[in-house]
Image (cartoon, rainbow, N blue to C red):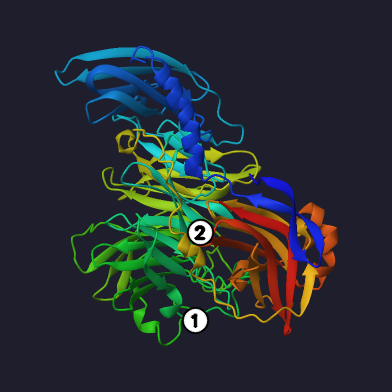
Amino acid sequence: MIRLLLLALLWLTGCQAKQTLTIDSTLSIFKTQANLEETMKQEFNETTYSIDSPYLVHDPYQNSPLSYLVMFETEEPSMIKYQVLGHTEQATLSYETNSYETTHQLTLIGLYPNESNTILLSATNEAGQTISHEMQIQTPPLPSDSLQVTLNQSTPLTHTTRLFLATDDTYKYLIDEYGDIRFIQNSTSGSITSLPNGNLLTYHGPYYFYYQQQLEEISYLGQVQKQLYIPGSGHHSLTLTADGNYIINSSDKTDERYTEDHLYILDAQTGIPLQTINLRDYLDINRFKDTLPESVKGDLDDWFHLNYAMIDESDETVIASGRSQSMVVKLDPTTKQLKWILGAPDEVNEQLKPYLLTPIGENFTWFFAQHSSKVLEDLDQNPDTVDLILFDNHVDIGVFPRESYPDLNQYSRAVHYRINEREMTVEQIWSFGENLSPALTSTIISEVDYLPKMKSMLVLYGFIQLNQSMGGKLFEVSATDSNDILMEMTFNKEGINHIYAIDTLTFDELNLNYSFTNSNATSLAKENLMSFKEPLNLDNPTQTKSYDSSFLSTIELVDDVLYLDGYIEKAQITDSFALVLTNESHESFTYSIHSADCYAVKTIDELPTGLQNRLKKAVKKQTLVQFIDRTDLSNLEKGTYRLSFYLKSNDALVLYETDYSLKLH
């Protein structure tokens, strides 16, 4: 929340005093959490809470409406177990701590919404003596905009239910095998991965379109435990290296305005890039240059559209999936060599043709506009082969000849390929979806995963027509017989909805311990925000103009990071543009705003309602851009700074003065 303090500050603008709007720093998420937790600590310390009468806080961070914090003390060091009784024996969820303590802090999840849940709580001391308590918790109903899950088909459970981790446009969910939602949490991103420590990792922080500039580690109680800024802007998949570092899909920033063609490996502890891989260094950016439609390329050149990246741990190579190219590639970042290209060969240039894999065997079908390309464990025990699965959306994005591929747009499917890297061949081992009746077509997103313990495939159709709405379907299918459907669920709610990701977890894989926030924590890797900011050598301005403050839709200062979203006219989108901060000693500090952070406004419908009439002339002239900028101000001395902009266009340097000042503490 922006705090605006109306102050009359004297600045040397002639001899006149000018009223300004001063932006004061808001608290970081960590300080906000720590302040909230102080109240909980005080309440807990005021009374003795025991296993028979525990301290219970419902959804303390106001983002996880089926989660509870449970705290109590035992006289002797004890390990704690709780059970949330299910509607069946297999649906009962159990969690145990692994150390003997006298003060116990637990996250309680797995409860059913809108009913009285029975929880069995027990404490066992080092002598093996156990005390128990049964309690009832009445939970609230699910939010009105949450998923409606229908179990269409299943096989009888003989094991404790697995939990499906799913995301949509609004929430993260844990859904059991009976189709019951047992956990829900607010979400700003459909991308998610479960970490080895039992927490969740997701993109966070609004930026542009579906791009985001932060990673956030969050617990099932809704407590943010880590936040870090990333280079470029993240999207689509989040995966891990074998040693737990983060692999993100992102971009660099160039005046050519390429997007979604970089992957970064980030140190999980610091957020600093350990490795940067630019797919333009390996592939042909001009393939489909004349045929890739504007609806795909848009204002930015999305020539590859990286939507999944991972490390093949068998040889430390990178697997990257590009929707715009209908291509999966394997490359060696150490030697900077391409290893192979999996995809239809149309318009591949002569330089890359030697890397194309040749199809062999019967019933082989190419994929198109794919997602979720994953290397599996070695299923055939042949060191020359690689098993790879992907979700084949099989849709026509306008670059492949329909006469050559007449089944485009007829179905979507999951497929398992086996690649012989020595012979440079590929065969199709398994496929699911072509024979569904009616056929299902998911034009975007979707996922497939292999479940080795069950020897099955989890197949998510993430964006399909469901009567009058858009939703998803989840199948579990035998990995050896695609006709053997083990489970089917439907995910639906009113309107247009996307089901982005699916994963399978067991309850004991979750981190349900709890500790209070370190109030001195801060967002990590702010330097990533500055990695594409260029030094500017600007002359004295030739003009000074007033910038209308209503053209800034966001101005926020959080943890010394300045968030700016606004509109300005530029003759060319690549014209030099900069933020200028001037302190009370009249020293100015200039920070470039990259052209890749400026986006052409093509219609007035893209503008906030209040600006449409005022800026329609600029839209008509095609000179209006939206700029979205994040700047780390940690290195500035504390004090008050006047905010202005420089714009260099047609050899004129204009200083735009705003009504805003920033107060750095």
Residue depicted at 35% across the width and 47% down the height: 195
The mark total stands at 2
Q: Quadrant of the N terminus?
A: top right
Q: Position of residue 212 (x, y in %)?
A: 53, 57
Q: Nearer the viewer, residue 438 or 41?
A: 41
**Badge 2 element:** loop
Residue density around tag 2, few if under 14, some if 14–19, many if 20 or more, within 10 Å: some
Residue type (three-letter) at the residue carrying disc 1? Glu
Reading the chain from its start, which is encountered first: label 1 or label 2? 1
The residue carrying pointer 1 sits among few (fewer than 14), some (14 to 19) or many (20 or more) residues within 10 Å by Cα, namely few
On the image, the x and y values in percent for residue 340 come to 34, 75
Position of residue 90 relative to residue 46, above or below, is: below
Disc 1 designates what residue? 347
Residue placed most toward the observer, 600 or 37: 37
Residue contact between numbered discs 1 and 2, judged by CB atoms under 8 Å: no
Q: Is residue 293 visible?
A: yes
Q: Is residue 622 left or right of residue 482?
A: right
Q: Secondary structure at mark 1?
A: loop
For residue 417, what is the image quadrant? bottom left
- Report if residue 440 is visible in the image: no
Lateral position of residue 360 relative to residue 630, left or right? left
Find disc 2 in the rendering and name its residue: 634
Q: Position of residue 89 (x, y in %)?
A: 33, 22
Q: Residue furthest left?
A: 127
Q: Is residue 23 left or right of residue 455?
A: right
Q: Dividing the picture into quarters, in which one does residue 375 lie? A: bottom left
The amino acid at mark 2 is Ser
Instruction: Please state the horizontal and vertical placement of residue 295, each as a whole percent of the image.
Output: 64, 67
